[in-house]
Amino acid sequence: MKANISRLFHKKKKQVIDLWMNNQLQDVSLREDLISNDDLRAQSEELVEVLVNKLNDDNLSVVDSADFDDVYEVLGGISITRARQGFSPRETGVYIFSLKDALLQILQEEFKNDPVSLYESTMKVSRLIDSFGIVTFETFIKGREEVILRQTDEISEISTPVIRVWDGILALPIIGTLDSSRTQIVMENLLQEIVASGSSIAILDISGVPAVDSLVAQHLIKTVSATRLMGAECIISGIRPEIAQTVVHLGIDLSGIVTKSTLASALKYAFSMLMLEVRKKQVSSGNNSRVVNG
Amino acid sequence: MDKIPILRMGQFLLVTIQVDLYDRLALNLESDLVQMVSKTDARGVLIDISAVSIVDSFMGRIIGNIASMSKIMDATTVVVGMQPAVAITLIELGLPLAGVHTALDVEKGMALLRTKILTDGEENEYSDESYDDSE
């Protein structure tokens, strides 16, 4: 009796598809706005086709059998396309589980007079389809995670530009929270740029950092020390009143570091260290400001 | 046994480390250098570590030691050309090398040494020649 299940599905492929389509069309939650009935049918036919081809009586009860790799691939494809079309994961799940109803209906008709076989085959089929349903969720989550990872990479990449504000002066505006991995990237970028440009002063602007706690302060101190080891001077600018308050309340010692409240004052300080001077031009020779070596 | 050459340049000693330092070599360098400082009466020591790509805590300590030793023998030590990766490693190891002067390259290191010698012990916070605070 057992030997019949896969052959039965193979034989009644057409009926399975029809039943499945029927089930879906009856479902009130069917999203006709997202997918046309023809597309839906094509999608369903593809899945049933590959399923009945791969199904045999040996692997029916082994849900992680390698035979189902193709099925999982089709399922993954369906899950991703449906996610792009705007289906919720729940709707995709319902879609797969409605296949179970169709298959069970067939089994019920076939084993009408044999409750034991009916029970056995029902169990097997539902376990298989449950596993398929889980795969669609996994694919959905994996797709989402990839998007999140890519965005994380992008954020860490775009948010740490090193700017050459003057010959020998680098500025590095930090936007967003500083954690260990970001500090590492910031530090590496800054040190590399110091070597590449031969700059002797780096300005670390933290006006875009929402909060400074002891960990962030420690990261800042590390960056400043590393810059100093390279032979360059590091100035921290953009210390807002709130930041100054928290830093002092936390008892963090920033006395060994040059700190300025704005980028402008840090730049002024850097100019004076390099013995440069910003002066207003004489009116007769134009009204732009210029810099002369002092 | 390899030896790291110590070159004399007027009042200064110039050490360029062109190979990756191993412990024995570093210890030899340390003793050679203090000997040399006392023999030549050097006023400044410039150590170029631009070719050093790997450091450990021992190496960091040796560099710190050399600086402190030269300091009490009245010679200023400047470490130049540290690689970014080396700097990050030393910081992560908790060795910020306080008391060691640093410069980006040999040229800037020499300029720094000269100002140091000229001001003769007078502590100058922005000691590089071009750094001199005009305020």
Image (spheres, grey):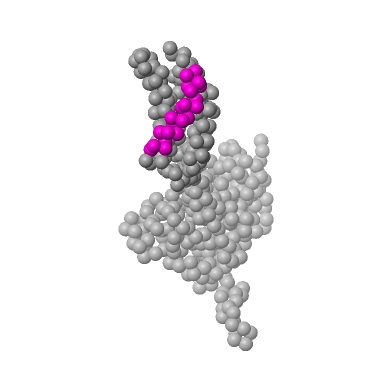
Task: Give whichever of A14, B125 is nearer the camera.
Answer: A14
- Up-down relation of residue B113 to residue B1 (above or below): below
Task: Give the main secondary structure, helix, strand or loop, of the magenta stretch.
Answer: helix
Q: What residue appears at the point 59 percent right and 82 percent down from the top-left corner?
A: A287
Q: What residue range appears in magenta?
A: A7-27
Examine the rendering and report whether any part of residue A229 can be seen: no
Residue A103 on the magenta span: no
Position of A241 with respect to A63 (left or right) is: left
Examine the rendering and report whether any part of residue A244 can be seen: yes
Q: Residue lying furthest left in this view?
A: A249
Q: How many marks?
A: 0
Q: Position of residue A281 (x, y in %)?
A: 59, 82
Q: Residue lying furthest bottom in this view?
A: A284
Q: Residue lying furthest top in this view?
A: A1
Task: Give whichever of A200, A36 is nearer the camera.
Answer: A36
Quadrant where the N terminus of chain B sits is top right
Q: Position of residue B97 (x, y in %)?
A: 50, 50
Task: Give whichever of B16, A275 is nearer the camera.
Answer: A275
Task: Give whichever of B52, B128 is nearer the camera.
Answer: B52
- Up-down relation of residue A265 to residue B47 (above or below): below
Q: What residue appears at the point 66 percent right and 45 percent down from the top-left corner?
A: B18
- Up-down relation of residue B115 to residue A216 (above or below): below
Position of B20 with respect to A84 (left or right) is: right
- Up-down relation of residue A68 to residue A95 (above or below): above
Q: What residue appears at the point 59 percent right and 79 percent down from the top-left corner?
A: A288
Q: Position of residue A266 (x, y in %)?
A: 49, 67
Q: Position of residue A185 (x, y in %)?
A: 52, 50
Q: What residue appears at the point 47 percent right and 19 percent down from the top-left corner?
A: A8
Residue A18 on the magenta span: yes
